[in-house]
Image (spheres, rainbow, N blue to C red):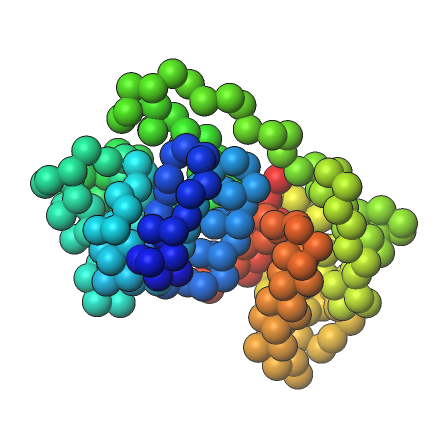
């Protein structure tokens, strides 16, 4: 979204939240989820895009990834903290103590490590905004999705009226992920669950199936808590 589009936005929902992350899937998933939970959220892939929007219309809270192309999230946080009263959340895959300390020293109020459930992120945004702005607590967000597989595992539902009929591959894939709900499932185990040979399988096809599933769910107004854990596998979080 351009700075001009942000300026034209007159959605009267507080707080205004900017998320800066160059992972398109994560960015879109979080922005859509935060919006569904009542927040006014916009995503940007780089520091430059964020600064243009912020100059046009400052946000109350910013969510930053550290590993951005060009200027990284630590630099953005330090710049904002030096001159602005704003809530800063680090949302990154870097989870070492050293990274956490660096993020907090650069000005982050909260440091979250991916994978992040959008409900936790939304609650963090609201709490941080209330603390920074001194406003009275905002109304509680709407009920969170209650994910389940029904009709013999062939239909995914979020308990909020949205349903998605699954393909054969998706049925087997989600069936295995639901058995290990909240835990990381290795890629080879998912491939095996789909009935493929783990030694003769193009693993990029697994990523294609996951991406297609996310896109189809999004069209049905469902934000899947399905996260890729680099080098390990996937997890379906509650």
- In the rendered image, residue 204, in percent from the top left (x then y), is placed at 57, 77
Q: Which residue is situated farthest in the left direction here?
A: 82
Quarter residue 111 falls in: top left
Residue 237 higher or lower than 211, as above or below: above
Question: Left or right: where does residue 91 sit relative to residue 162?
Answer: left
Residue plotted at (82% across, 53% down): 155
Question: Left or right: where does residue 237 sit relative to residue 152?
Answer: left
Locate the C terminus and report the quarter of the image it occupies: top right
- In the rendered image, residue 131, in percent from the top left (x then y), is placed at 30, 22
Question: Left or right: where does residue 166 sit relative to residue 23?
Answer: right
Given residues 80 and 69, the one toward you in this image is 80
Residue plotted at (60% across, 67% down): 211
Given residues 203 and 211, the one toward you in this image is 211
Residue 168 in view in this figure: yes
Given residues 40 and 97, the one toward you in this image is 40
- In the rendered image, residue 178, in percent from the top left (x then y), is placed at 71, 48
Locate the N terminus and report the quarter of the image it occupies: bottom left
Residue plotted at (21% across, 51% down): 55
- In the rendered image, residue 32, in percent from the top left (x then y), is placed at 53, 50
Residue 214 higher or lower than 62, as above or below: below
């Amino acid at each position: 979204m351009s700075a001009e589009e942000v300026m034209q936005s007159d959605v009267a929902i507080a707080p205004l939240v900017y998320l800066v992350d160059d992972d398109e899937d994560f960015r879109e998933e979080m922005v859509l989820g935060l919006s569904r939970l009542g927040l006014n959220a916009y995503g940007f892939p780089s520091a430059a895009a964020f600064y243009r929007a912020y100059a046009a219309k400052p946000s109350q809270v910013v969510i930053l990834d550290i590993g951005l192309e060009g200027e990284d999230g630590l630099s953005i946080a330090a710049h904002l903290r030096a001159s602005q009263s704003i809530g800063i959340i680090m949302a990154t895959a870097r989870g070492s103590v050293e990274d956490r300390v660096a993020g907090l020293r650069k000005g982050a109020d909260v440091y979250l490590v991916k994978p992040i459930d959008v409900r936790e992120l939304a609650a963090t945004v609201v709490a941080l905004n209330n603390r920074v702005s001194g406003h009275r607590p905002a109304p509680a967000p709407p009920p969170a999705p209650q994910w389940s597989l029904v009709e013999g595992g062939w239909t995914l539902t979020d308990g909020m009226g949205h349903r998605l009929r699954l393909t054969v591959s998706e049925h087997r894939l989600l069936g295995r992920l639901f058995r290990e709900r909240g835990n990381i499932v290795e890629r080879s185990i998912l491939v095996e669950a789909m009935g493929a040979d783990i030694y003769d399988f193009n693993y990029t096809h697994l990523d294609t199936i996951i991406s297609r599933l996310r896109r189809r769910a999004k069209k049905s107004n469902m934000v899947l808590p399905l996260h890729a854990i680099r080098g390990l596998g996937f997890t379906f979080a509650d």
